[in-house]
Amino acid sequence: MSIPGPRNSAPLRILHHLQKPSLWPETLQHRSPQPTSSIKRSNMATRALVVGGTGGIGYAIACRIAADSATSTVIISGRNKPSNIPHANIEFRLLDASSMQSIKKYTDAYKAATPEKSLDLLVLTQGILTTAGRTETPEGIDYKMALHYYGRQLLIRELTPALKDDAKVLVVLDGVRGSPPAKLNWDDLDLKTHFSLASAADHCISMNDAMIQVHAQEGTRHFVHAYPGLVRTEIFHTLPWYMRVPLRPFTVLLGVTADTCAQNLIKGTYEFSSAEDKDGKLWGCIDAKGHVVPNKPTWSDVELKKVADHTWDIVDKAIRQQDSQL
């Protein structure tokens, strides 16, 4: 689908969307990071699962955790195994994160093979950058929204029994710009009939904001929604040439490396979870520097329930499709 408006303005609009990491493809020049000296090793996860960790920011986060401590165990999951896995304590497990049925099978297998409450850190970065309109998966969910929102929430729900009581969950999309309820079409939350690229981004961002609050109500674990800023990746290979060429200088001049972004987000997540001045909140949003985003609106109980009910209705219907075909 072409982007509305003059062609020469399209790259700037795409640049706005490039700052959402889950829109990045799972491709990146894979490099092994140095240990994060600014993060205490005692705070680092000993067991981490990074979905979307086969490329981009997710891969950089996984490598940073693995490099920081040889005793850590890091699982990366996505569609394609990276050609270079630089650390012996990183394991790849295949997952189609756009399919709710695949996610359910994956999480069931993970829980069956892993002791309860053994996971320290769950990181969700999966996604895609595309200018296409609504493109449904075989389960009837828009492909972009399945990756950026619905699949993430299903992973959190199903893996909750595996999370330690003090575990951290890091959702990487855009923890800065979400706001309720103005950006939501409450009568069409999955945008079945009112889809646009802008509305899909708004719904995924805002509903991720809402759901970290829902999950945080259920225990002692910390939930963080992060904004990565502009990061240098190989994202341009997925764009038309007339967008790819003018956008590249922006990322070269203004973007940070994936490893720098990973360091900022990990540091911000652990600093938030250990802060004593967050008024007892177990959820928060951080920016590209890892700093807490101030004045995030707290959703009303009615709004949170409506988003949660909608989310579980969509993902559970998708899962039940397989049962009905047996």
Image: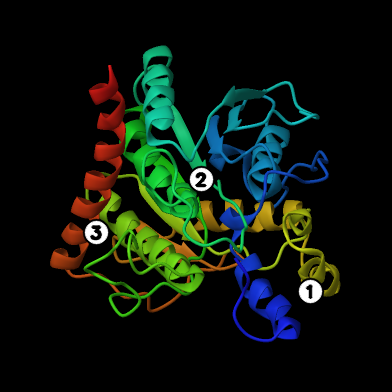
Cβ atoms under marks 2 and 1 closer than 8 Å: no
Residue 324 spot, x, y in % from top left:
23, 24
Callout 3 crowding tier (Cα within 10 Å): few <14, some 14–19, many ≥20: some
Quadrant of the snapshot with the C terminus: top left
Q: Quadrant of residue 65?
A: top right
214 vs 166: above or below: below
Callout 1 crowding tier (Cα within 10 Å): few <14, some 14–19, many ≥20: few
Residue type (three-letter) at the residue carrying disc 2: Leu
User: Circle 1 sits in a helix, a strand or a loop, which is it?
Assistant: helix
Judging depth in this view, the residue of 151 and 11 nearest the camera is 11
Q: Is residue 170 left or right of residue 193?
A: right
Judging depth in this view, the residue of 110 and 105 nearest the camera is 105
Quadrant of the snapshot with the N terminus: bottom right
* Residue of label 3: 307
Q: Is residue 16 left or right of residue 173?
A: right
* Residue of label 1: 254
* Residue of label 2: 124
User: Circle 2 sits in a helix, a strand or a loop, which is it?
Assistant: strand
Q: Report the Cα–Cα distance between label 3 and label 1.
A: 35 Å
Residue type (three-letter) at the residue carrying disc 1: Leu
Lower sequence index among marks 2 and 1: 2
